[in-house]
Image: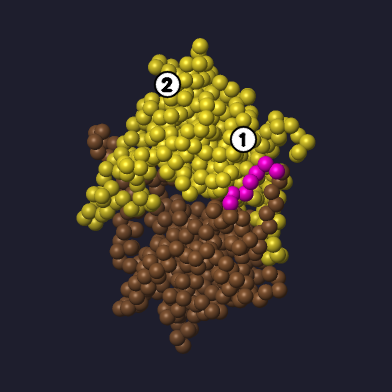
Chain colours: A yellow, B brown
Amino acid sequence: MSSMGEDEEVSSFFESSPPLKKMEDILEKLNGFIELNSSGEKRRIVCVTSGGTTVPLEQRCVRYIDNFSSGNRGAASTENFVKAGYAVVFLYRSGTCQPYCRSLPDDPFLECFQSLDNTNIQVHSSHVEAVKMAVMDQQAAVAEARLLKLPFTTIYEYLQMLRLIATALKDVGPCSMFYLAAAVSDFYVPWNSMTEHKIESGSGPLDIRLAQVPKMLSILRTTWAPKAFCISFKLETDAKILIDKATKALGKYKVHAVVANELSTRKEEVVVVSSSGNVVVRRDSDKPESIVEDNLIRLIVDRHSTYIKESHS
Amino acid sequence: MSSMGEDEEVSSFFESSPPLKKMEDILEKLNGFIELNSSGEKRRIVCVTSGGTTVPLEQRCVRYIDNFSSGNRGAASTENFVKAGYAVVFLYRSGTCQPYCRSLPDDPFLECFQSLDNTNIQVHSSHVEAVKMAVMDQQAAVAEARLLKLPFTTIYEYLQMLRLIATALKDVGPCSMFYLAAAVSDFYVPWNSMTEHKIESGSGPLDIRLAQVPKMLSILRTTWAPKAFCISFKLETDAKILIDKATKALGKYKVHAVVANELSTRKEEVVVVSSSGNVVVRRDSDKPESIVEDNLIRLIVDRHSTYIKESHS
């Protein structure tokens, strides 16, 4: 693999991936959504990626490597983008946090309801407002064509769908944005070298060799959607190396900004690293309801506005 | 590790595990539940395990290996055990299928509701019955102390909780059962040898060495709950080796039966392997609502009745 060029590694990844199921269906939804939003008032369109990708260890998958991500950042950012007037393609890992659902309990379906008289159910009074907001705001966003939700599970699905979206957004040009908050696997088992059946246990330790997932960011920037505004994320558990790694990613992939988060403090602050310097963005700690994403999306939207103006001048 | 005895491997696993959070709280719930069910009419108590365990690859976990399991079998079996008069301790992976929720859509919270008049929401008429059943049946089971739900995520949490439950059920003797439907990792990274921080990418392929998780079934049978009736599961993707592996597991762990499932046909049939021979259990294919678990639990409950009688004679 090391002798391959970057483009070749990317082609080889896609050629060996199991084909995306329901591709026609996804494309139809996607093109319809983009058309609705780019005709008439011409909204800006952002693709928000959210949640972690999985890497199967067997073709008939029993075991897989997962990348931890609750999807909270992606969901909260989506709400803020919709509020700022954007149309959002929400590319999310099945089962992770959904927009407008952040204030619900962990298992909202069974925890939000009570039986009234043994023949009917109602929402617990303590959750009435949160439940109404979750259902109504999400339905309004979908009905107004502000929100298209597309789920994925594996790294293969994620990267194929990201390519579809990027290609479909090409004509939207500088008014499109990629906000890549998903936790994408760095390592994977190439499909062709993967065992078909469940790996057997019982004969000592198991050694797994994982290949590096080719970096798709360069291709996204140079080929798939070169005019789109592009924000990537860098998560580390070690604060000491975080800014350095984010700065290197900025230089390497030529994205417009890298949002640096440290695992333990990510809900309190992030650092937006860009060519115009590093900006620390915090939640408003004096307001209990405030979240980092309220301030982060305001900053990103401003930067996007500047980018659109510069692209047109 | 290979020179260690089985007991030693088990002790070493627990000693190196990160301690279980909220242990006091779990124990209090558990003991209260067992007391309520063993006083008075003395119900049989079954611990149903469900969903897959995760194996962290880093102490500050960003990546982990997961074992695929929707939790459907455990949830459906729990409903059938409650119907058969059992009290169920449902030890389940967070986020997997819950009892009474099988007929709901994938994302029930947002898919079951519609807004009525822009100020109120109601359940879609197509889902009214399923939603009512899910909420009311689950609440009734919990209210009657027939169902105690305890969530886990990692293999460390799962095995520590299983030990707690087995120990707490000791006095229930032959009237207790373990129905071990969870997909438990065979391999793990010992906590002490695990890297603290996120594994860095960028320097070629990644090699991971995984140790075998010590088999706790023997210890469960011989030490933790020797009088309990014990059913384990064997899942394979290769039908050719399935029955052989299930038969070997029966001999090795001295459980009362092994339920053999093949990944692709597991919703149509299973084989119950025991010392009295192999029994194929199928769903009633002429009834569309029928599931394998309806017939499987009937068989298991019969076997448990025989076991209780023989234990008392």
- Magenta region includes residue B200: yes
Q: Which residue is mark 2?
A: A43
The amino acid at mark 2 is Arg
- The answer to whether residue B269 is visible is no
Give, as a single range, the part of the protein colored magenta.
B197-203
Residue A147: image tag: none
Query: How far apart are the two marked residues, 1 and 2, measured between alpha carbons?
Result: 32 Å
Do callouts 1 and 2 mark residues in contact (Cβ within 8 Å)? Answer: no
Q: Quadrant of the N terminus of chain A?
A: top right
Q: Which of pointers 1 and 2 lies earlier in the amino acid sequence?
A: 2
Spot occupied by residue A212 in the image (x, y as percentages of width and height): 68, 42
- The answer to whether residue A244 is visible is yes
The residue lying at 30 percent from left, 78 percent from top is: B40
The overriding secondary structure of the stretch rendered in magenta is: loop
The amino acid at mark 1 is Lys
The residue lying at 33 percent from left, 35 percent from top is: A137
Chain letter, disc 2 residue: A
Spot occupied by residue B219 in the image (x, y as percentages of width and height): 56, 75
Q: Closer to us: mark 1 or mark 2?
A: 1
Chain letter, disc 1 residue: A
Task: Judge the density around disc 2: few (<14), some (14-19), many (≥20) Cα neighbours within 10 Å.
Answer: some
Residue at the outermost bottom position: B313
The residue lying at 33 percent from left, 63 percent from top is: B142
